[in-house]
Image: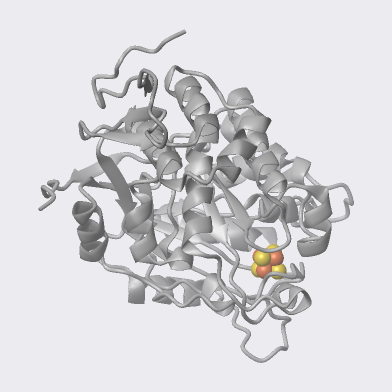
Amino acid sequence: MTRPPTAATGATPTQRSAGPAAGAPATVVPLPNGHAAPIHDPALARIADKVLSGGRVTFEEGMTLFATPDLPGLAALADAVRAEKVGDKAYYVHSLRLSQTNVCYVGCTFCGFQRTMDQEGVWDMDLPDVWAFVEKHATPDLVEIHISSGHHPKRGWDYYLDLTRGLTERGYQVKAWTAAEIHHFTRIARPAGTTAPVSYREVLSELKDAGLIAMPGGGAEIFAERVRRRIARAKVDADGWLDVHRTAHELGLPTNATMLYGHVETLEERLDHMMRIRDLQDEAPGFMSFVPLAFQPDNNQLAREIGKTEFTTGLDDLRNLAVARVVLDNVPHVKGYWIMITPELVQVSLGAGVSDVDGTISDERIAHASGASTETGITEGELIRLIQDAGRTPVKRDAIYTELEVHPARPLA
Ligand code: SF4
């Protein structure tokens, strides 16, 4: 089946040049700006034809995307897929990151953030401390509070409900609680005197009643058991993570999905991770965006174990984002997380499949505990400038992608 050109982008299936001379491009990808990008790798050209005709890549084809030497061609294909979904828009959110504690008992080996309760550098906010933190960091146009924190061994269930409710009552959208935390909550939410955990559905329903509007995608790491055993042994397993998100989607709670890459995983395991997200999205739609998270190599056990001292490279980051955009055909957005791969590379990635640059954040602590070299926050004006200078239209969104404000695009010089 051939998809007609879309009104938004004019993207059509790739065009074969008749009998290309040696060295000439085998295929060109029509781009939304009216230009065309050449694809030099014949294997990639065959996949481009399929994808832009409405086909879905297989696992083998996904591996070809990871292997192609034609990164510009892959980026052009990802850009065409992106453009079919969002036209020339690129999204950002005015957000605040809240990490109310770094106390955590889980012990993921990649994490430099976690502390035990009596360890140097620990913090742990009671609710009045949280309200004071928010008051200090909130600006009048703050939309979303995104909570990222540890699994506290002592806090009770009411604390999390009161935290969610209190932020909501103060007028903020609360995007919070990873699937791993939801799994933890099923233990602490059980009635006194009982031993069986309550269900994911019960926990999520109570949080939703308290105001929770969306869930982040953390805790996914890499689904492959071989890797998970090594980096996140005590965390909810892959099936549990997927089950939490399935349940959230069924309850009308949209979520994101992350993937931590650049450590001990193979490319096959990255692709397997993406495919499992694609399968769940087919079954129970509700993912808003896919967020690749680049491994940060400082202050964590995993980096020491594997002797890793370097960050992921820009080309690996870009390829990963582009592959994700092509593979995850049913997920609306691929997000470039500037905290981990720099604002400059995220700007470049807007031409390789990315349609969301995340947000202002203001007080990121988790990636920085493991060596992130970026700032802990960024201004809204800077996000707008990055998007405009990439030739895109900046759109301020809320936590669930409601469009709040469309800024003018700036023509490329
Ligand atoms: S990644 Fe999260 S769950 Fe794992 S140790 Fe760090 S804070 Fe705890």
Res. 247 in view:
no
Res. 205 in view:
yes
Q: Residue at x 43, y 71 (%)?
A: 131
Q: How many marks?
A: 0
The percent coordinates of residue 160 (x first, y second) are 60, 59
Quarter occupied by residue 96: bottom left
Q: Which one is in front, 283 or 75?
A: 75
Q: Which one is in front, 343 or 367?
A: 343
Q: Residue at x 55, y 79 (%)?
A: 371
Left or right relative to 67: residue 319: left
Tell me: residue 359, above or below residue 352.
Answer: below
Q: Quadrant of ligand 1?
A: bottom right
Tell me: residue 371, above or below residue 342.
Answer: below
Residue positioned most to the top: 1
Left or right relative to 49: residue 177: right
Left or right relative to 374: residue 186: right
The percent coordinates of residue 185 (x first, y second) are 71, 54
Residue positioned most to the front: 22
The percent coordinates of residue 60 (x first, y second) are 67, 31
Q: Residue at x 73, y 88 (%)?
A: 118
Q: Which one is in front, 79 or 120?
A: 79
Tell me: residue 218, above or below residue 379.
Answer: above
The percent coordinates of residue 126 (x first, y second) are 56, 75
Q: Colour scheme in the image?
A: one colour
